[in-house]
Amino acid sequence: MYCVKCGVELKDSEHVCPLCLTPVYHPDVKQEDVERPYPQFRRVTRKSVRTAVMFIVTVCFILVSLMVMMIDFNITGSITWSGYVVGALAITYVSFALPEWFSHPNPVIFTPIAFASIILYLLYIDLTVQGGWFLSLAFPIAGIAGIIVTTVVTLLRYVKRGHLFIIGGALIATGGYVSLIEMFISITFESVSFVGWSGFPLAAFFVLGMMLIIIGICKPLRLALSKIFFV
């Protein structure tokens, strides 16, 4: 008996071709459950490969963190600069490696988790250096950025139409966000002016955002641009 796909010779006890996994069926040959001449083939799934790769990546992150902390402790006698390195590694892992544990990671969930890790890292730095700038500068800047990005990601994922409006609104919000950054810097470091250099990116982002919104409103313009740029 031979495989109908690859032509390899098969024993009468084979139910699946060991070479190409094609089901074996012959109406004139009765297949009995006896010891097979070939070992049973086990298909390696994509999930198992991803789990194995992420396990190796996780172990590498842990080993690098422990090695950095041991070097720091051996040199200084305490944990000093290694805390910043380990924190940066933790942010990298949470932002890029953690979602890969799941077959279909939802960015609406993992985006705020990534920003939360950034906020905790900034809090650690502030407490370590005793800067006193976390609540007035780092927390509002990182928190507002997380809200904007999470909102845009959520809308792009669950709203099927109107992406031009979403991106245009995101650009306008980014311009306002830059102005807020300057304001928080002024409050934290007691500067004189609240509005200075941020006016230029605010104007640029506002113009770009309004252009996308106008394109989204004007259907003939939108169709003409889609034909020109093949989108």
Image (tube, rainbow, N blue to C red):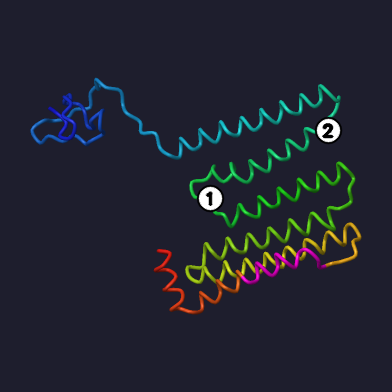
* Residue most extreme to the left: 28
Residue 184, x across and y down, in percent: 82, 61
Quadrant of the frame with the N terminus: top left
- Magenta span covers which residues? 195-207
- What is the three-letter code of the residue carrying label 1? Pro
| Disc 1 crowd, CA 10 A, few/some/many (<14, 14-19, 20+) | few
Residue 57, x across and y down, in percent: 58, 33
- What's the mark number on residue 80? 2
- What is the three-letter code of the residue carrying label 2? Thr
Is residue 43 depicted above or below 174 in this figure? above
Specify whether 151 is left or right of 40: right
Which residue: 42% across, 68% down?
226
In reply to whether residue 199 is colored magenta, the answer given is: yes
Labels 2 and 1: the sequence-earlier one: 2
- What's the mark number on residue 105? 1
Quadrant of the frame with the C terminus: bottom left
Residue 115, x across and y down, in percent: 69, 52
| Disc 2 crowd, CA 10 A, few/some/many (<14, 14-19, 20+) | some
Q: Give the quarter of the image for residue 66.
A: top right
Prevailing secondary structure of the magenta residues:
helix
Q: Give the quarter of the image for residue 87.
A: top right
